[in-house]
Amino acid sequence: MKAICKFTIAMFLMLLTAQLNAQKKVEPLPPKEQQIVVDSVGNKLNANYIFPEIASKMFSSIQSKLKNGNYRSILDPHEFATTLTKDLQAISKDKHLRVTFAPEQIAEQQQAITPEDSIAYLTRRINIMKRNNYGFKELKIMAGNIGYLDLRSFSNVEYAGETAVSAMNFLSNTDAIIIDLRNNGGGSPAMIQLITSYLFENHPVHLNNFYWRPSDQNSQTWTLPHVPGTRSPNTPIYVLTSGRTFSAAEEFSYNLKHLKRATLVGETTGGGAHPGGPIVATDRFMVWVPTGRAINPITNTNWEGTGVSPHIKCSAADALDIAYKKALEELIKNNKDKDLQTFYEWPLAKLKLKTNPVTLDTKTLKAFVGVYGPRVVTFENGKLFYQRGNGTKYELLPYSDTEFMLKDLDSFRIRFLTNGNTVTALQGLYDNGHTDRNAKGKG
């Protein structure tokens, strides 16, 4: 488990280094180095790749292409790494598997000889994760007491554990939780285990099984019997997914889906279920080798190549609004308390307005114009406006035939009361459930 966590850091750094190297001028790639890279990558795959027979086919393929001169014209190391990756994935269909040109990272690793060097090397890597808040991008309570967590990675629990614990405790008083994995590329199974443990009772729940080819051993992950703070075992969970959701983020989604613990909203995920890590192939090239495979205890399979399909399919861009709306609707449906229903209906009305705007004709709008005690409603340039005394003038946005929101003011709305076809009063609606009323003056 700890090895996977280290791989998570290394993978992030390998991609970062590749991006930095792409901006620098590098030495051309001679044919002899191509041969060394192909041989080394092939040997690493034969020794470690989860499926030995596929590893052999991949090695034979790139050896044959090298011998036939397919790579002869490739002088740029980045292009060579990209081409090898494409050729390897063409056979394996494994999206985790990739070759990367990363000379600076390799040199830095190899130069970490003394304990002081190693500590300094690790500190730099931890600081990179820290600057990204270990993947915890955004945490908030949305209107209606709906918790929201934008999680960009499942970072190493050894470093990110305190942040995760704080986040899950922050969400513990909410009535529903939305976990946004639309931009999450994966990470550590241990972080999956920690976060998931907050979503169940303290008795162990079997999450996943793994088979590891290098050691020919199996491992299991279960929820933890103890977590710091408060669990949320009965809180409705919604997980947002996209085609960019990958690896550990897919496992988290897949686990909760088949444990019937969450509703998935969005797009089918990327389809990478083989954990592993980067291995140095030469002094300038690394290869990310999947060394294990997930075997879910409920389905006895995984999401490799197929991805995780959501319960509610929609575009990634619309997933948050749809999940938010679903959460509020379910809370209204499952609560008989009228005050709570009103509490949930308040943000729901605004959400509905985004997707189903209400349009009223000019005649109807002008019927609301008038003086209501200290409140004045006017019609200007085809729109209604509300003002109390000398206060701010707000545009009115209809969300029913008689109810209006105030643009840029979320805590107050108005309802026009009628007697037949005549508007008789204006009722003020407050987000805390309070109401007041002013009769319409005679003009």
Image (tube, rainbow, N blue to C red):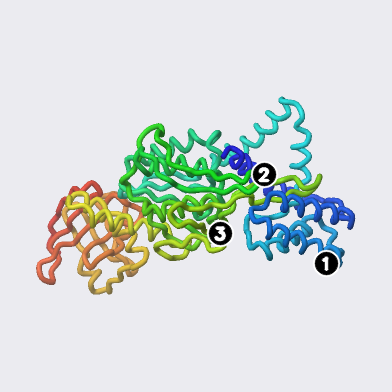
Which of pointers 2 and 1 lies earlier in the amino acid sequence? 2
> Is 391 or 111 nearer to us in this picture?
111
- Whether 112 is drawn above or below 12: the answer is above
| Structural crowding at the residue carrying mark 2, measured as other residues with C-alpha within 10 Å and reported as few (<14), some (14–19) or many (≥20) | some
**Label 1 Cα crowd, 10 Å radius (few <14 / some 14-19 / many 20+):** few
Mark 2 in CB contact with mark 3 (< 8 angstroms): no
Identify residue for label 2: 13
Q: Which amino acid is tagged 3?
A: Glu
Q: Nearer the viewer, mark 2 or mark 1?
A: 1
Residue at the image point whose x is 48% and y is 60% from the top: 308
Residue at image point 85% right, 67% down: 68
Q: Amino acid at mark 1?
A: Asn
Q: Position of residue 134 (x, y in %)?
A: 54, 40
The answer to whether marks 2 and 1 mark residues whose Cβ atoms lie closer than 8 Å is no
Q: Position of residue 11 (x, y in %)?
A: 65, 46
195 with respect to 439 (left or right): right
* Cα–Cα gap, marks 2 and 1: 30 Å
Mark 3 lies on a secondary structure that is: loop
Q: Measure the C-alpha gap from mark 1 to mark 3.
A: 29 Å
Q: Quadrant of the C terminus?
A: bottom left
Query: Sequence order check: which comes first, mark 1 or mark 3?
Result: 1
Which SS class for mark 2? helix
Q: Nearer the viewer, residue 150 or 426?
A: 150
The residue where tag 1 is placed is 70
Label placed on residue 304: 3
- Residue 285 placement (x, y as % from top left): 77, 49
Which image quarter: residue 363?
Answer: bottom left
Instruction: Name which residue lies at 48% across and 36% down.
Output: 163
